[in-house]
Amino acid sequence: MRPGARRWLPRPSWPHTLRARLTVGLVVLLAVSCAAVGVAAVVELNGFLTGRLDQQLRETGARFPASLEHGGSLPSDHDGDEDGDGDTRRQTVGTFGARLVGDTVTNAAVVASGSGTGTVTVSLGAQDRRRIAGLPADDEGHTTDLSSLGEYRLMAAQGRDGDILITGLPMEPVEATVHRLELVAAVVFGAALAVAGVAGALWVRWSLRPLSRVAATATRVSELPLSSGEVAPAPRAPESDPRSEVGRVADAFNAMLGHVEDALTKRHASEERLRSFAADASHELRTPVASVRGHAELALLHPGPVPGKVVRALERIEAEAARMGEMVDDLLLLARLDAGRPLERLPVDLTRLVLDAVTDAQAAGPGHRWTLELSEEPVTVPGDAHRLHQVLANLLANARLHTPVGSTVTISLETEDSTALLKIHDDGPGVAGDVRPRVFERFTRADRRRTEDAGAGAGTGLGLSIVAAVAEAHSGSVTLASRPGSTTFTVRLPTDVG
């Protein structure tokens, strides 16, 4: 077999559920048992009836073949139809007799059926003659197939004149009885298997009801959203007999659910404390940050002479205060979105927002090529216009800051069914593989090797997390597909109001 060819072989068909496996196993075991009983009964009956034939042959003795010594000679090339003179007294119809002198069969006849005419001489073929000549004179029965008569049970005995006298009885009654037993056994065992299969399936179904309830509970638990937020109490598996395997599984499962609930409750409490801290800290930091920025601007407006180094320091203070203010605003927005505060749900012309955002991006990044692909009809979605504009601004800023000058950024907007598809594609170096799984997490920064102009703007690591949070708050989603030379962010927003 070639390497890897095994995987293309068809898998054997086998029941998948435990209930089906137990039922099939029960029926198979019963079928094997019935087959063993049937075979043993058939073999035993066949041996018993064959032994009776041997006993009958011993009791009959060689009187019939001995009487053939005075009968006519055996024809060799044609069927014998004339009546013989053999002694048929106390002989069963169909009894076969033959006399063997040396290796030559001199006489052979059978008892005629239902008449007083005595015997009928039979003609034996060469093969039948060889088989009869090969019988040992041991007074034991031997089953032999005679082509002119059928299957016979033959017994050879030594005659008084040095010849061999052969007596036989037909095997047809034995075979008929055995075949009838086989038919009866097949019918009875088949009916028993059918009844046992149905009864076994019902019994297994009833016995596995506690396990089915545990499986149904596990399925309901698996459908609970456990990744974030407050988790509703998980359903418990019904109590069962603790002495049974299913009862022990149910108890262990319920104990595990209790531990999971405790862990999730503690995690949710920790997340709530962290969100509360982020919201409080952001709210409290807005005033001092604004104050620092205001004082820096006021100092820069001083009419008197100010040393250049001081001016530079004040400009840096103002720039960093502005950057810190944006970070505080972003953290406060994320904290509000995490708290589940509803956004506005008004009709928003997404096409107009895209045009405005691209215009701003062109002004901020004149070294990039900006391309628009818009549908002919305006795309309108329900939502918060300010937050959706922030999504567009963050995605375009991300494309501008993390691609080299001269890169092409394509913005496309279309509708698919009841969903608006907004795609931001660039032909830059792509997102690093270790960053892709956590690109929408907070404070995640792209690898600086992704851009040749990393100093153009370091960012705060919150832009894409805000994009994901705002999209989710609008019942939408955002995904990333990236490889070297092609990076695409896709935002999906429902167009239906309600």
Image (cartoon, rainbow, N blue to C red):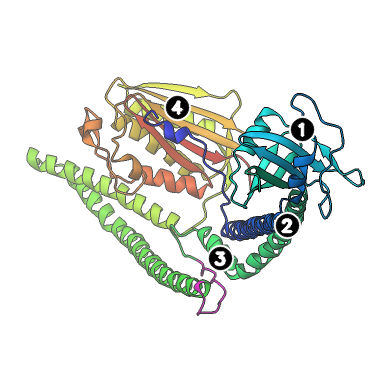
Left/right placement of residue 477 relative to residue 376 reads left
Q: Disc 1 or disc 3, which is closer to the eye?
A: 1
Location of residue 438 (image quadrant): top left
Q: Are marks 4 and 3 in contact (CB under 8 Å)?
A: no
**Residue hosting label 3:** 217
Q: Which residues are magenta?
A: 232-245
Please tell me whether residue 425 is drawn above or below residue 217 in the rendered image: above
The type of residue carrying mark 3 is Thr
The answer to whether any part of residue 307 appears in the image is no
The type of residue carrying mark 4 is Ile
Among the two numbered marks 2 and 3 on one chain, the one whose residue lies closer to the N terminus:
2
Distance between the Cα atoms at labels 2 and 1?
A: 27 Å
**Residue hosting label 2:** 56
Please tell me whether residue 61 is drawn above or below residue 358 in the rendered image: below
Residue 241 among those drawn in magenta: yes
* Disc 2 element: helix
* Disc 3 element: helix
Q: Main secondary structure of the magenta part?
A: loop
Q: Which mark is residue 73?
A: 1
Q: Disc 4 or disc 1, which is closer to the eye?
A: 1
The type of residue carrying mark 2 is Gln
Location of residue 411 (image quadrant): top left
For the point 37% across and 55% down, which residue is it? 332
